[in-house]
């Protein structure tokens, strides 16, 4: 993995994680619809039960046949949609896990500064004045923050 790819993954981390959650919910909904599509109840009635004035010959009517065909086409469409959603989820999950796995390998200070800089989009100056001061109760220069971030990025690439 190159430095540019890693930085791009870090910057898109929040968006990818949100997309992943949305796609997982869509996938769950599609699977529920597919299951509901498979649970079809097609029944015929006897001539002396309900609607006894209608003489049924227990033939499948066009309504039942069209409903079966609609359910079959719907089932095929849902299966194709589920397959494409699974591919998207797999890709997003790989991106999110690549960032999370590499962040685990960093020390606390490196991880917090890197997350604040790339993922949260804060500036080095802002980090040095607020986050670094909150963590260590001392000031530092934005250049020092930049050096820590560069060092942590190199460390992530080597993981």
Image (cartoon, grey):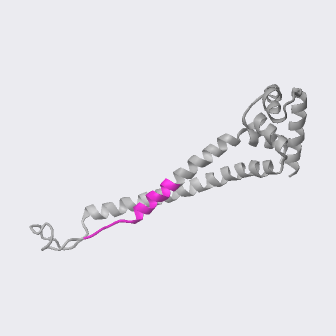
Residue at image coords 15%, 68%: 50
Which residues, given as a range, are shown in magenta? 28-43
Q: Position of residue 68 (x, y in %)?
A: 34, 64
- In the rendered structure, the answer to whether residue 130 lies left or right of residue 20 reads right
- Quarter location, residue 135: top right
- In the rendered structure, the answer to whether residue 11 lies left or right of residue 66 reads right
Q: Is residue 124 above or below residue 46?
A: above
Residue in the foreground of this view, choosing between 116 and 34: 116
Majority secondary structure in the magenta region: helix
Residue in the foreground of this view, choosing between 105 and 26: 105
Residue at image coords 56%, 46%: 22
Q: Position of residue 107 (x, y in %)?
A: 85, 46
- In the rendered structure, the answer to whether residue 92 lies left or right of residue 38 reads right
Q: Is residue 56 above or below residue 72?
A: below
Q: Position of residue 133 (x, y in %)?
A: 82, 30
Q: Residue furthest front?
A: 137
């Amino acid at each position: 993995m190159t430095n540019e790819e890693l930085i791009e993954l870090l910057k898109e981390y929040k968006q990818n994680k949100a997309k992943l959650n949305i796609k997982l919910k869509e996938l769950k909904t599609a699977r529920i619809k597919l299951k509901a599509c498979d649970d079809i109840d097609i029944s015929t009635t006897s001539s002396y039960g309900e609607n006894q004035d209608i003489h049924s010959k227990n033939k499948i009517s066009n309504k039942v046949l069209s409903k079966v065909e609609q359910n079959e086409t719907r089932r095929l469409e849902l299966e194709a949609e589920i397959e494409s959603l699974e591919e998207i989820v797999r890709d997003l999950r790989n991106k999110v896990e690549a960032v999370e796995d590499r962040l685990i390998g960093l020390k606390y200070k490196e991880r917090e500064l890197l997350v604040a800089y790339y993922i949260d989009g804060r500036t080095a100056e802002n980090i040095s004045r607020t986050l670094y001061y909150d963590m260590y109760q001392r000031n530092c220069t934005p250049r020092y923050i930049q050096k820590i971030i560069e060092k942590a990025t190199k460390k992530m690439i080597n993981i």
